[in-house]
Image (tube, rainbow, N blue to C red):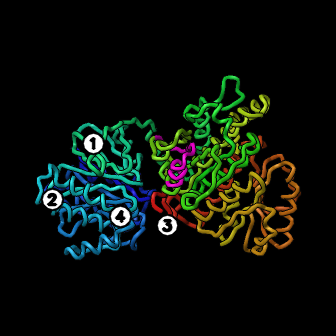
Amino acid sequence: MCGIVGYIGRERAGSIMLDGLKRLEYRGYDSSGMVVNAGKGLELIKRTGRVKELEDALDELQLGGNLGISHTRWATHGDVTEANAHPHQSTDGKIYLVHNGVIENYIGMKNFLIEKGYSFKSETDSEALCNLIAYHYGKEEETTAKNRFLEAVRKSLRHVEGTYGIAVICDDYPDELIGARKGSPLIIGIGKGENILASDVNAITHCTQNVVYLNDNEVVHLTNNDFSISTVSSKSVEAVIHQVDWDTSEAELGDYDHYMLKEIHEQPNALKNGMRGRFSDDKSTAVFGGLNLNPQELRQIDRILFIACGTAWHACLIAEYLIERFARIPVEVEYASEFRYRNAPLDKNTLVIAISQSGETIDTLGALREAKRKGYRTLSINNSVGSTIARECDGGIYQHAGPEIGVASTKAFTSQLLICGMLALYLGRLRDLSYGDGVDIVKAFKELPELVQEALKQTAQIEAIAKKYAKYEDCLFLGRQLMFPIALEGALKLKEISYIHAEGYPAAEMKHGPIALISEDCPSVFLATSGEIFHKSLANVQEVKARKGKVICIATADCEIPDGLVDDIILVPECHEIVKPILMSIPVQLLSYYVALERECDVDKPRNLAKSVTVE
């Protein structure tokens, strides 16, 4: 959450940072601001609302300068006001800071600084750190420190409890930029005669492909031609430069009205990329290069624990069904935010797998570290090469879905489902899944992109259905077995972007409470697939219809739905059970998108939400 961009170089800092903020606005869009070295000292400007408000203000000011820091905010401490927007300025006017994270001991810090004569304009925790750096900077005047500014930042960070990703500049050091991180991502973009700091690689790739990922408790000191990394305790760190291979055009909107719609339609390619080069020569199993666990070690696994948050947690539930079905390994799924704070007993042969699209989700990272602390082997599934979770796991699988900008996850979710299905195949073939079954599953995966393309042809029909139901304020999503997690995901999508109250349940559980909600004003979305429980799903539909409830049925084409039983039906192609969750996700996503559109909601930037959750 929150986007940070800092720049030092030869170009106009304001323009570079503004472009970066636009690319990071999905991380927070309550307010934004920047401070630029404009030739006559540092100039600060902040605005509430979207980055466009800041852009309009900058057009009027025509700020130059080649040094600056900027920020787009997702509010944690304090209301959405210009005073609470970043950057923050110290009382003495020397220090400017932007911050992502939560400083847990800021109240004590603030009280100490007030006693020392410092004043505060905001309600934020971030301003306390800004003034603390100013306090230590003032004290450093009495020392012979080689770099007074850098030492003041280091000393201040030693007092911080909580998380931070920060960029800091000082009025007395017009050619230097300092960044640091603990629990909140920060990346250095290495250019020619310029360097960039950002909280997300999206803000960097249009300027350079060379990046350095900061680790926790590291501080970077930047000039336009050089940089050095050290720890908070002043120990020197050798930088490792990575190359980002993302195609920057993937993060552009193109001809689509919204990123969410673009990313829904990118799913066939995202799925192709996720499976490219990952099947064995005999086409009977999956192949993963980065697990760092050999087949013998994987055969000794007695239990798998998945940890995740939000949409990724729904992907974990699908993984539970598929791995238990095809690999016969017991699987449990935990909310990462709960697992990290309880003492769950785990068998010594438990494998912990974290799923996170960004690879920076703070709760998932905390849960992962707790598992590692107790000695368990860990893997990750994520979409961000070089992310913290990817670097801290023993091994992992990259999704290769490309950048996802829309806050409501679409292609990243179906990509996670793909990887989970392929992992179920891989583990199953290591155990008792037959060669023939493996061949059938690989064939199903290879056919999947075309089937998704077929499902996308239902767009016009789904848009028409969405217009009929957009007026309702409540909705139930119901499904059995593999369709239950998709029901949860459908309800979440509708809540996220249309603000309709929606709940997902196993269809059979409807009778145990939720059926009380059924009325003419509360439609239900049933997810039905062929198989042994299909007729039981139809019985659940009958129960809703008997109570005057409206029903939208999303089903595979091999389902025989009696005429007149449902109000609206959306069919997707018949397919193998292992890919049904992916295929059934497509109409769920489109339905939510068009309902939100009909309600005139901001699809890509829904209220109160941000893309990457890096604060607790």
Residue 244 part of the magenta segment: no
Q: Residue 232, image x and y in percent?
A: 29, 51
Magenta residue span: 366-385
Label of residue 53 in the image: 4
Can the viewer see residue 274 in this picture? Answer: yes
Q: CA distance from mark 1 to mark 4?
A: 41 Å
Residue lying at the far top of the rendered structure: 281
Sequence-wise first label, 4 or 2: 4
Residue 418, quarter of the rendered image: top right
User: Amino acid under label 1?
Assistant: Ser
Residue holding disc 1? 236
Sequence-wise first label, 2 or 1: 2
Q: Are marks 4 and 3 in contact (CB under 8 Å)?
A: no
User: Amino acid under label 3?
Assistant: Asn
Sequence-wise first label, 2 or 3: 2
Q: Nearer the viewer, mark 4 or mark 3?
A: 3
Residue holding disc 3? 608
Q: CA distance from mark 3 to mark 1?
A: 40 Å
Residue holding disc 2? 140
Can the viewer see residue 45 in this picture? Answer: no
Element assignment for label 4? helix
Element assignment for label 1? strand
